[in-house]
């Protein structure tokens, strides 16, 4: 009776590469979170209205009309510049939170009652709209990053 066998050295090499990948998985998750947070930040800044203080009326990115107040020496953009990203790592999970600490940010996002109760100013929902946009492209962004990572690591 003859002997038969096969070479498993390729499997051992593959196993070593898989073990190496396991140690790098956190970097991929962090890279994905970083990329999506950056895209969300870019979108929300574009959608955030900047005040106009020359007295003229204007239509913002959300399509809402505004009456510009006349105030000399004042420039808009505080709300746009206020957007921040906070990253946390907890139990192997990576989380990125986009927030705006400017005190009137939630009034602009969700809307507010005019002082004296004489009407309601419609919200812009710039963060919510931006989140939805990024949510649509997130699977492709993650898939592309995973393919690059796996393709490069398994060569």
Image: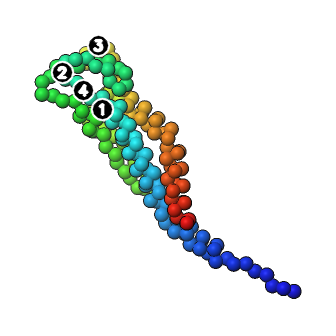
Give the number of the mark in front: 4 or 1. 4
Side of 2 where 32 appears, left or right: left
The quadrant in which residue 43 appears is top left
The residue that appears at 42% across and 48% down in the rendered structure is 35
The residue that appears at 69% across and 78% down in the rendered structure is 7
Q: Residues within 10 Å of mark 4 (few under 14, many from 20)?
A: some
Disc with the residue nearer the chain's start (1 vs 3): 1
**Residue bearing the label numbered 1:** 105
The CA distance from mark 3 to mark 4 is 21 Å
The CA distance from mark 2 to mark 3 is 24 Å
The CA distance from mark 4 to mark 2 is 9 Å
Q: Secondary structure at mark 2?
A: loop
The residue that appears at 30% across and 40% down in the rendered structure is 83
**Residue bearing the label numbered 4:** 51
The residue that appears at 34% across and 46% down in the rendered structure is 85
**Residue bearing the label numbered 2:** 54
The CA distance from mark 4 to mark 1 is 13 Å
Tell me if residue 96 comes above or below residue 132 in the rendering: below
**Which disc is residue 78 wearing?**
none
**Which disc is residue 118 wearing?**
3
Give the number of the mark in front: 2 or 3. 2
């Amino acid at each position: 009776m003859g002997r038969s066998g096969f070479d498993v050295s390729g499997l051992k090499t593959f196993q070593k590469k898989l073990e190496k990948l396991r140690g790098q998985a956190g970097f991929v998750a962090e890279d994905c979170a970083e990329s999506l947070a950056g895209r969300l930040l870019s979108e929300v800044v574009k959608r955030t209205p900047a005040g106009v203080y020359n007295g003229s009326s204007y239509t913002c990115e959300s399509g809402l009309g505004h009456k510009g107040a006349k105030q000399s020496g004042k420039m808009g953009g505080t709300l746009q510049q206020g957007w921040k990203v906070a990253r946390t790592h907890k139990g192997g999970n990576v989380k990125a939170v986009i927030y705006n600490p400017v005190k009137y940010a939630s009034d602009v996002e969700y809307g507010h009652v005019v002082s004296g109760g004489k009407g309601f100013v419609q919200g812009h929902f710039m963060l919510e709209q931006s989140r939805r946009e990024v949510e649509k492209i997130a699977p492709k962004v993650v898939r592309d990053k995973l393919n690059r990572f796996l393709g490069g690591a398994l060569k």
